[in-house]
Image (cartoon, rainbow, N blue to C red):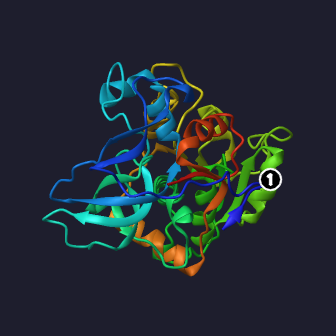
Amino acid sequence: MINGQQATEGGVPASQPASGTMRAIVQEAYGPADVLHQARIPLPAIAEDQVLVRVRAAGLDRGTWHVTTGRPYALRLAYGFRAPKNPVPGMDLAGTVEAVGAKVARFAVGDQVFGTGKGTFAEYAAASEDQLAHKPANISFEQAAAVPVSACTALIAVRAGGLDARRGIPQRRLKVLVTGASGGVGSYAVQCAKAAGAEVTGVSSPAKLDLVRALGADHVVDYTAQDFADGTEKYDVIIDIAGNPSVSRLRRALTPTGTAVITGGEEGGSWTGGLDRQFRALALSPFIRQKLTMIVGTQSAADLGYLAGLLEEGTISPAIDRIFPLAKVPDAMRYFDAGKARGKVVVTI
């Protein structure tokens, strides 16, 4: 594990549920971290294709931040107009299977798993069988919880750029630029691109350049001192996770037939976020030689299983900055929102 300056924020001993209830972080409205608080609520019910996981650790990702704040507003069409339909935030999880649905075939009670579930900032969470994998034995629950959403998104982005370690190392070493390389998705994008044989340049703030180098980047760019689109270098693939370079800047940094993969978008308006930039890129792409595309992160058992293999080999390693106990989730959210995190923020239950 690649650690930041501080590895822990304390811990809370796990407790058995009392009378079918559990501790969880809940919110009754959208808003900043102040809307989050700890409560005792009923254990979740599981469907026939789901398992009940006793959560040992949960990751904090940008998607969870969006759902908590209710921004951009367009997402409320799916998650609830005035407040989240599910009051418990959180997607990433790692833990132990407590119960299985009638149609679950891949897992049994007692199995250690990681993946995504519904409302994972809690002692227990329901998760679909097809969004879980067995946890590698050589990593901790905290490390495993830092993987699912961010690493699956990075893997999809790298493959969209034409890089896939499963197809072998390409004859020509592709030059790949990763913006936001020190964040949750970016830290895995650097490692997955390296695993596919690319020459990787990572863009980040000066305080995080050492982390990007430790992740395996061949070159680093301090965005406060250098513009990656100044014409000095041209890249075969740009994986844009930072969410603010214009389409024209991305194109200037690409080779004539290069590919830009855009994921995320934090600089757009309150209604659509950065999606308008992504849609503009998609609309332009058919008329130029360069390929401009966007991806949406999803999690599947197949990708989680593939990542588990990379974790077992040591090809990729979670970069964890801080670990917060469940009761301190509001503090974890504030820390995440401040942009201070070097890699992932994890919650331990």
Binning the other alpha carbons within 10 Å of mark 1 as few (below 14), some (14 to 19) or many (20 upward) gives: many
Work out whether 36 lies above or below 176: above
Q: Which of these two is toward me, 176 or 65? A: 65
The reply to whether residue 290 is visible in this rendering is no
At a point 29% along the width and 59% down the height, the residue shown is 52
At a point 33% along the width and 73% down the height, the residue shown is 110
Work out whether 74 lies above or below 15: above
Q: Secondary structure at mark 1?
A: helix
Pinpoint residue 302: horizontal percent, then vertical percent: 35, 67
At a point 44% along the width and 36% down the height, the residue shown is 282
The reply to whether residue 338 is visible in this rendering is yes
Q: Which of these two is toward me, 333 or 72? A: 333
Pinpoint residue 272: horizontal percent, then vertical percent: 45, 24
- Please state, as top left, top right, bottom left or bottom right, where the N terminus lies in the image: bottom right
Pinpoint residue 286: horizontal percent, then vertical percent: 43, 39
* Residue bearing mark 1: 209
Give the side of residue 144 with respect to residue 233, left or right: left
Amino acid residing under circle 1: Leu
Pinpoint residue 136: horizontal percent, then vertical percent: 47, 76
Give the side of residue 166 with respect to residue 183, left or right: left
Q: Which of these two is toward me, 218 or 260? A: 218
Work out whether 80 lies above or below 194: above
**Residue at the far right in the pictured view:** 225
